[in-house]
Image (cartoon, rainbow, N blue to C red):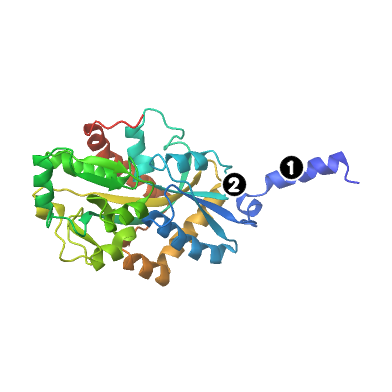
Amino acid sequence: MITRRAAIGAGLAAAALPLGRAWAAYPERPIRWIVGYAAGGGTDILARLVAGSMSARLGQPIVIENRPGAATAVGAEAAAKAAPDGYTLFTAGNETLIFNPNLYKRLAYDPTKDFAPIGLMARFHLVLTVKKDSGFRDAKGLIARAKAQPGAIAYGSPGVGSPHHLAMERLAKEAGVSMNHVPYRGMAPVLNDLMANTLEAAVVDAAAGGETLRSGRVRPLAVCAPERLSTLPDVPTVTEALGLPRFEAYAWQGVVAPARTPEAVIARLSQDVATALQDPAVRSRMMEIGLEPLSGGPADYAKLIADERAVWDPVVKGLNLSLD
C-alpha cells in the first residue's frame, strides 16, 4: 500500500519535472483538429493535407472535425472551450481573428486571449467568378449590370463574414455597386450551384475551385491579387479589369491551440507544422490546387495578425456590416 507521505512525495516530484520531460510522451492519443467550414472546401483540404503529414511523425491520427457556421465562430467557440492539453487544434485565419471582431458585437470567443498560435500554413488566392453560361464575359460587364440594376445580381460565398464575402463587398463598394449576398455553408456548395448555373457569381478561392476554374466549368473574371496567377495566366487582376487601385484580398490560415496549452506542446506542434509544409508531397499538392504556403511560427503568426488588423479593421468598419 502506498503511504500518504509517499503519494505526496511522488506528486511533488512530478510537479518539479521540467515541462519538456512532463510532456515527453505527448501525444498519447488521437488529436482533434476543428475546421470551421464544411468538408470539401479549401480550408478542409489544407487541414487534411497538413494533418496527414503531421500524424506520421506524431505517431497518432489527427481527426478532422468539421464545424461550419457563423463565419467560423461555431468552430472557434468549440476550440476556445476545449481543454488546453494539446489534443485540440483549430484552423484560424483572417475571418476568425480579424473580421469577426469587427462584424459581431458579441463573440463567444476572444480572438486575442483564447488561442495560442502554433504556425502559419497558407494563403488562398481569391478569384471573381461567374457561372459558365453567364452573359458576362468580363468583370466590366458584371459591374455595369450591377450599376444598372442594383441588387439584381446574386453572388454566393462560403459564409457571412468569410474572406470571400468581404472581398466581394469591398469590391462592390469600391466599384460603386450593390449586389445580393447569398451565404452558403462552405465553398463546395457555392461551386456546385455555379456549375449548375443556379448562381450567377461568387468570389472563389483557387484551392477549392482550382480545377473548375481551369477546366472552364465556371468562368473566372479577375483575380484579387496584385499580379496574375501562374495557374490562371490569362485572367486579369481586379486592378487591370476594373481600374481599382491597389485592390488586394486573400484568405490566409494558420493553426492554433486553446490558450494555456503547455509551451512544450506548442513548440512540438509548431515544428511539426513547419516540417509538414516542407514535405515535397504536401507542397506540390498545395501549389497544384492554388495554395501559397506560408512559413512562420508563433511570433510570425502574431505579427501577421497585427499587420492584417491595421489594414482590414478600417476597411471592414467602413463597409458598415453587422452580423448581430
Number of numbered tags placed on the structure image: 2
Q: Is residue 267 left or right of residue 243?
A: right
Q: Nearer the viewer, residue 66 or 291?
A: 66
Q: Is residue 215 left or right of residue 1?
A: left
Q: Residue furthest right?
A: 1
Image vertical order of residue 153 relative to residue 217, above or below: above
Image quarter where the C terminus lies is top left
Image vertical order of residue 271 relative to residue 34, above or below: below
At label 2, which amino acid type do we have?
Asp
- Residue at (25, 55) in percent of width and height: 197
- Residue at (24, 30) in percent of width and height: 320
Q: Position of residue 25 (x, y in %)?
A: 65, 57
- Residue at (51, 53) in percent of width and height: 267
At label 1, which amino acid type do we have?
Leu
Q: Position of residue 205 (x, y in %)?
A: 29, 55
Q: Position of residue 128 (x, y in %)?
A: 21, 53
Q: Nearer the viewer, residue 135 or 81?
A: 135
| Spatial separation of the CA atoms under disc 2 and disc 1 | 20 Å
Dot 2 falls on a residue whose secondary structure is: loop
Sort mark 1 into few (<14), some (14-19) or many (20+) by Cα contacts within 10 Å.
few
Residue that carries the numbered disc 1 in the rendered image: 12
Q: Give the numbered dot on residue 85.
A: 2
Q: Nearer the viewer, residue 199 or 65?
A: 199
- Residue at (58, 50) in percent of width and height: 87
